[in-house]
Amino acid sequence: NIWQQSCLSIWLILCLFPRTCVSNPSKPNFLLILADDLGIGDVGCYGNDTIRTPNIDGLAKEGVRLSQHIAAAAVCTPSRAAFLTGRYPIRSGMASNTQYRVLFWNGCSGGLPPNETTFAGILHQQGYSTALVGKWHMGVNCESSHDHCHHPLHHGFDYFYGMPFTLLNECQGTDDPELAKSLQDTYWLRSQIIFLAVLTLLIGKLTSLFQVKWKIIICVAICGLLYFLSWFSSYGFTKYWNCILMRNHDITEQPMNLERTTSNMLKEAVSFIERNKHRPFLLFFSLLHVHTPLITTEKFLGRSRHGLYGDNVEEMDWIVGKLLDVIDKEGLKNTTFIYFASDHGGSVEAHRGNVHLGGWNGIYKGGKGMGGWEGGIRVPGIVRWPGVLPADIVISEPTSLMDIFPTVVHLAGGVVPQDRVIDGRTLLPLLQGTAQHSEHEFMFHYCGVVLHAVRWHQKDRGTTWKAHYVTPVFQPEDSGACFGRRICSCFGDSVTHHDPPLLFDLSRDPSEANPLSADTEPLFDTIVNRIGKAVEEHRRTLTPVPQQLSPYNNVWKPWLQPCCGTFPFCWCDKENNKADDIL
């Protein structure tokens, strides 16, 4: 009959032109793009009118922009751990109880614990092809140089190409070390003192100015040499130990060739999408931009009005554009959930001489390293999924990078783990407009293991309160940064404790410029007491776990160092694509 013929015709059209239709919207592809150290004020759609970011702005125009998107930590390692697991880093042991809050070496034993579940692991079980291209910075090995217990391939990714560590000034070979500079300065000073002591003893012995046995001179000289070697063997060769590229478990460049890193990363991402266009995939593109030393190709140098940092941001936007182009080219636009964010706020202390090399955090106070102030944790967040999510809207409700975990897992048809606390909340009701308020009532802002601030989303009043229990001491006092230390501390003499806490109404004072008091806010005591009760309830959900960033776990161990040769002769270049430059 006519009805059956019509159905047959429609079926034939769908078979002949499969790429013109949206596949099952409940199981999309995922392209998750995470920038490194990007400030919320560095992007056009968040208010910047001098740095050009047309591709990111276009993504926001076609999707949903989150204006109160919060990172779980203000530095790389713990923030990324929370992003992948949907859990506060203190739950996984990825929050530090020392002044060193990120992993320092590829050759250390700390990292994302093997018993943590990532969204990549769940999607892998759901039949997705999963890849990480770019920065990892969550550990490599535990007990040997080849056990790869913290490696991306042991956390649900089928394919990895990128840096197991993070970019550093040392990768470029500059004379401005970035890795524990104050500690290196201390080591150098002590080594020089020992050298001068040996030299003084030697001169005194040879000129008979004083009597000293040769055994003492030799003993002091040997101890001094051993002390020097104990720290210089690691810090003196940071470029070789940390600045490496890997493809899966194999090292392809040691040290890495920065001139072609951007090209190689982009080519790997494009190739992965092209290889997996006919099956569901997850691509986590973890940008090296815009972390110092701001590696920028010649094509973008001098293009922006904000020096090298602006050039690097504009190149990052171009990279995002290239990824969007391949999604469009392969007919995947309507079947791909795309997310763009930064791991935390921009660095306000980063500089070289009088040149600022960090990001701009807009109207928000503070920046990278400051666990409580908005500038360190409020980041850009953009989601696009044409045909499923609305376009060109802004959501001002509190959301978190941790929310990506349950959102992605749900869309892929998986189930979030039931044997642990998941702090993220699915974004779908907010994104689709079926819910008006975020599921987050309280959000806890840690600096290492120290709780610095708490956010209370009082939904019935449409108000977001924020209480600061600890704030960093700025150096200089009114600078809004810790220039004396290069990054603010979480505890000790470098912070101020507040009792009662500093209280702000973020709905009216997002810049956190005017703290409230019992005189200016009638409900001050009620608000502070309610937040205090939430802190007590939150702390009851915490359980002791091994500290992955403890001094022992974060020290360089030669036997754990990834090496493409015979240690310590670690150098290689296995990349054969010099003529295949996508740039």
Image (cartoon, rainbow, N blue to C red):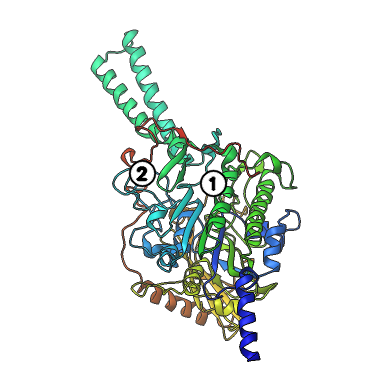
Spot occupied by residue 390 in the image (x, y as percentages of width and height):
66, 76
Spot occupied by residue 410 in the image (x, y as percentages of width and height):
48, 74
The residue carrying mark 1 is: 486
Q: Secondary structure at mark 2?
A: loop
Q: Is residue 309 visible?
A: yes
In the figure, 21 relative to 167: above or below? Answer: below
**Image-quadrant location for residue 414:** bottom left
- Name the residue nearer the viewer: 209 or 307: 307
Which quadrant is the C terminus positioned in? top right
Q: Secondary structure at mark 1?
A: loop
Name the mark on residue 303.
none
Of mark 1 and mark 2, the one earlier in the sequence is 1
**Image-quadrant location for residue 384:** bottom right
In the figure, 142 relative to 572: above or below? Answer: below
The reply to whether discs 1 and 2 touch (Cβ–Cβ < 8 Å) is: no
Is residue 59 toward the left or the right of residue 482 in the image? right
Is residue 373 toward the left or the right of residue 543 in the image? right
**Image-quadrant location for residue 120:** bottom left
The residue carrying mark 2 is: 555
Which quadrant is the N terminus positioned in? bottom right
Q: Residue at 52% across / 66% down in the picture? A: 401
